[in-house]
Amino acid sequence: MNWCAEQKEVSIISMSLGGPSDTFTNNNVKNIIEGKGILIVVAAGNNGDDARKYSPASEETAFTVAASNTSNTLASFSNYGPSVDIIAPGVNCKLAKANSKSFITLSGTSMATPLVAGWAAIIKGCKQSYKANELIDYMNQHAAKGLIQDPLRNTPNQFIRVDCVPDCENDREKPSTDGFELKC
């Protein structure tokens, strides 16, 4: 995590890992987000339990992702609760198989998390000056509300909307040229 944060021009980190709630891990996530403005998107976990019991999902400054199934309900394995920020598809996800021309099908919050990180990256591409808190605000404001049937135990009922991104043509910020003229 620290290595990722120290690389040049990192804006978003996607983390599909977890373990018991751990102050060291959570503080590390918090320091990266607050110190560098990097958005850290984390998997809620696959224990069918309260995500507050696990790290880094329990860190309040991270953007925590639970998984839904094809029936628009929280996946039975997905962790849940108030530390979850958003829900994304995470059941029977078809993925390219490494070193192959075929696909594999997997389920888990680790499948849902990169979808949210990708949405954040699309937004960041149009809103280049956005830091973690602004990306989170945008996603919270534009997530689909109330789509998940019976979200568990205070899990926010907001769902990823990849169709909702800034109008890049009108919103794209011009990159800094540091005094140089850019010509195409």
Image (spheres, rainbow, N blue to C red):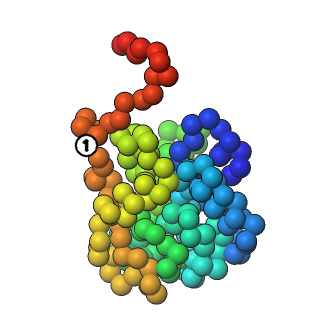
Residue 25 is situated, as x and y percent measured from the top left of the image, at: 71, 64
Quarter placement of the C terminus: top left
Residue at figure coordinates x 49%, y 79% from the top left: 82
Residue 33 is situated, as x and y percent measured from the top left of the image, at: 59, 56
Is residue 17 placed above or below 164 in the rendered structure?
A: below
| Residue 122 in view | no
**Residue 90 image-quadrant placement:** bottom left
Which residue is farthest bottom? 153
Residue at figure coordinates x 69%, y 75% from the top left: 21
Q: Nearer the viewer, residue 32 or 20?
A: 32
In this rendering, would 31 be left or right of 101?
A: right
Is residue 115 placed above or below 4 in the rendered structure?
A: below
Residue 183 is situated, as x and y percent measured from the top left of the image, at: 37, 12
Residue at figure coordinates x 43%, y 68% from the top left: 86
Q: Secondary structure at mark 1?
A: loop
Q: How many marks?
A: 1
Instruction: Report which residue position mark 1 lands on.
Output: 167
Q: Nearer the viewer, residue 44 or 8?
A: 8
Which residue is farthest front? 179
Is residue 178 placed above or below 44 in the rendered structure?
A: above
**Residue 92 image-quadrant placement:** bottom left
Residue 69 is situated, as x and y percent measured from the top left of the image, at: 40, 71
Residue type at tag 1: Asp
Is residue 58 placed above or below 17 in the rendered structure?
A: below
Q: Residues within 10 Å of mark 1 (few under 14, many from 20)?
A: few
Residue at figure coordinates x 28%, y 53% from the top left: 164
| Residue 83 in view | yes
